[in-house]
Every structure is written in structure tokens, then in C-alpha cells.
Amino acid sequence: MTIQTPETPFPILIIDDYPVMKMPKRLTVLEAVRFKQVCHQYLASGSLAKQLVLDFGETEFMDSSGVGALVHNFKAAQSKNVSLILYHTPPPVMAVLSMTGLDEIIPITTTLETHQPLSVATQPPETHPSVRSWIKRTIDIIGSLVGLSITAILYVPIAITIVLDSPGPIFFHQTRCGWMGKRFKIIKFRSMCVNAEALKEKVPNQAKGAIFKNAHDPRITKVGRFLRRTSLDELPQFWNVLKGEMSLVGTRPPTPDEVERYEVPQWQRLNVKPGMTGEWQVYGRSRITNFEQVIELDLRYQKNWSHWYDLQLIFKTLLIVFHKNSGAA
């Protein structure tokens, strides 16, 4: 029995009494949008089986948009008490699931009768040429070592001023989402009061969309405003670059709660590593108050990327970093 015709994208077939959705060879932004639509239509159709099986047997590639659609559909299925189960996951798909941690959240099966977590070690997908560029990685390593040397020199005076102004930790750690949505801990010099995260809900958001901004955020300390204006608070991020979690140049690293609000096409910005600087830093910085502008700049970076383009953005960042109107996000 077929619920949808085989010619329809993402046909749902009944196999051994299980509804099985056939996944395409490539799951990028166009397919991902359709995947979300079809899945949500099925979940809204009425009488549902206790599980929906996604057959990835023919899938050869999945990028961050595919990850976003999968996350959306997993949550939608949960709300309907339907188990979303992944079936026939080939190495390229398993690599994505493993690096994003979804293999520990979404059940994966080799048969339609049982499901159990699988682990397949393979090369992650090349969602963008910059991801596997050894030249870009070399520039990142050299730049991060230089940056960490500067950080070591400035550490003592910065640490003293932070503590004198606002007693508490010198560093601020926050979970951010990197390439393909993989989470990591970003590190900065603390520029806010100690309980800033708890007070966030009390601060009005002046931005539109899945970003948070307030030009006069009361949580920022006096020293913190100076650190942000000069971008000194970001110096410890060179450690994230050295570890490979970030790049010197890339897209703005979002917080998990921001990613929770993404529509499927907006996940495209996670096809590259997040950067300490990028188009958003050079051409928008704190003036950006609309998330669509962030998306536009991030996708423009991905389109225009080259090693020379990265070096241009680094140079432009150095030129504007101490400008009186440059404030960090």
C-alpha cells in the first residue's frame, strides 16, 4: 500500500506494516524544505502509526539544511507521540549524525523490527570548499598562535580590570553551534555581570529574528563595554580556532536557542565553520538588527569565499576594530 505516489518527492510506503519514507540521494536545502513539508503533512493526516521510518539507503550527501529538517521533523513527531527511526543509514549520513550528536538522540536501525544506535567512522561531508582546505586551516593555526601570544601578554592587565570592576570569573564560557550545528564552548573575557545569562529574559531584544541584541544592555559592565568596543573580549577565542572549532574567518557562531528558531533554509549558514570575524563583522557588526541581514551576509561569504577573500576580511577587521563605533556582538 502506498500513501503517496512513488513519483512524489519523499514517498511514504507501507512495508511490513511500517510507514517508510524514502529519502533522496542528496538532502540539501531544496530537498530539506520539501522533507519538512511532507513529514509535517503526514503527521497532521490523522491516524498515525507509532513510528515513522526514514529510509536513507540511497542518500549520498546531507548538509546542515538536511540536519535542520531532520531536527524539525524529530520534534514534530515527538509532539504527536510518533517515534522517528532512521533506517539504512550509509556512512556519509552516519558521519553527519555522529558529529552532530543526533546518533545519540534519534533511534537508528538496520532492520524494521528493532532499532539500536550505530557508530560508523567516516570522513565528514564537505559542505563547503573552505571546510577541508588545508591552506585555510594552516592560516588558522598560525593566526591563532599569534593571537594567543598577544592574549598572554594582555591577560594580566585585562584580568585585573575585569575583577576590580565586577568580582567573578575572568573568562565567560557559552555553548555555541558550529559547523553543521555541532555544539562547542566558546571562550571570551567576561564583559557582563556574573549572572548575565539568568537576566537575559529581562532585557528587551531590539533585533528581529533569531538573534539577540540590545544596544544598551544593562548586563554589560563598564570594563566590558571597553573590551567589546575594542574587541579585546574576543581574544580567548583564538583557543577555539586552534582547536578547530572555529576559524579566523567564517560566519557568526549562533547560540543553541537561536538555532532552535531557524527555518530549514537558514541552516545553510552552518555549512561553514563559524569565525572570529567575517562579513557580518566587517560590514554589519552591531548595526545589524535583523536576522535576515545576518543570513544574507553569511551566504554572501560562502559564495565569495577564497583564501584571498579571507585575508581581505582579516585586514578590514584590523582596520575597523578600534573604530569608535565598532561594538561587538
Image: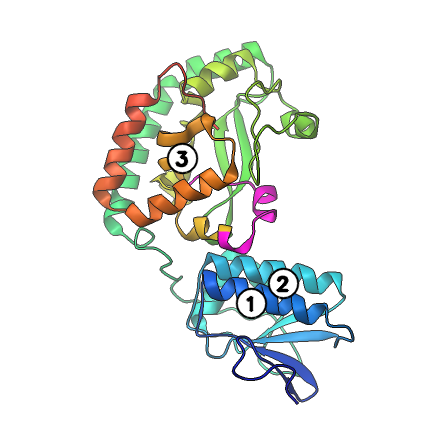
Give the residues drawn in magenta, as a range: 251-265
Q: On residue 35, which mark appears?
A: 1
Instruction: Judge whether residue 97 can be spotted in this image.
Output: no
Q: Nearer the viewer, residue 65 or 197?
A: 65
Residue drawn 60% across the image and 65% down it: 37
Horizontal relation, residue 102 to residue 240: left or right: right
Find residue 203 and report its horizontal and vertical position in percent: 66, 25
Would you name the residue on which mark 3 appears? 280
Secondary structure under tag 3 reads: helix
Q: On residue 73, which mark appears?
A: 2
- Cα gap from disc 1 to disc 2, whole angstroms: 9 Å
Q: Is residue 265 above or below residue 174?
A: below
Q: Dot 1: within a 10 Å radius of its alpha carbon, few (fewer than 14), some, or many (20 or more) residues? A: many
Find residue 231 and report its horizontal and vertical position in percent: 41, 22
Residue drawn 49% across the image and 37% down it: 186
Amino acid type assigned to the residue bearing label 2 in the image: Asn
Q: Nearer the viewer, residue 226 or 327?
A: 327
Residue drawn 49% across the image and 12% down it: 160
Instruction: Judge whether residue 318 can be spotted in this image.
Output: yes
- Cα gap from disc 3 to disc 1, whole angstroms: 30 Å
Amino acid type assigned to the residue bearing label 1 in the image: Phe
Q: Are marks 3 and 1 in contact (CB under 8 Å)?
A: no
> For the N terminus, which image quadrant?
bottom right
Amino acid type assigned to the residue bearing label 3 in the image: Trp
Residue drawn 50% across the image and 50% down it: 266
**Dot placed on the residue nearer the N-terminal end, 1 or 2:** 1
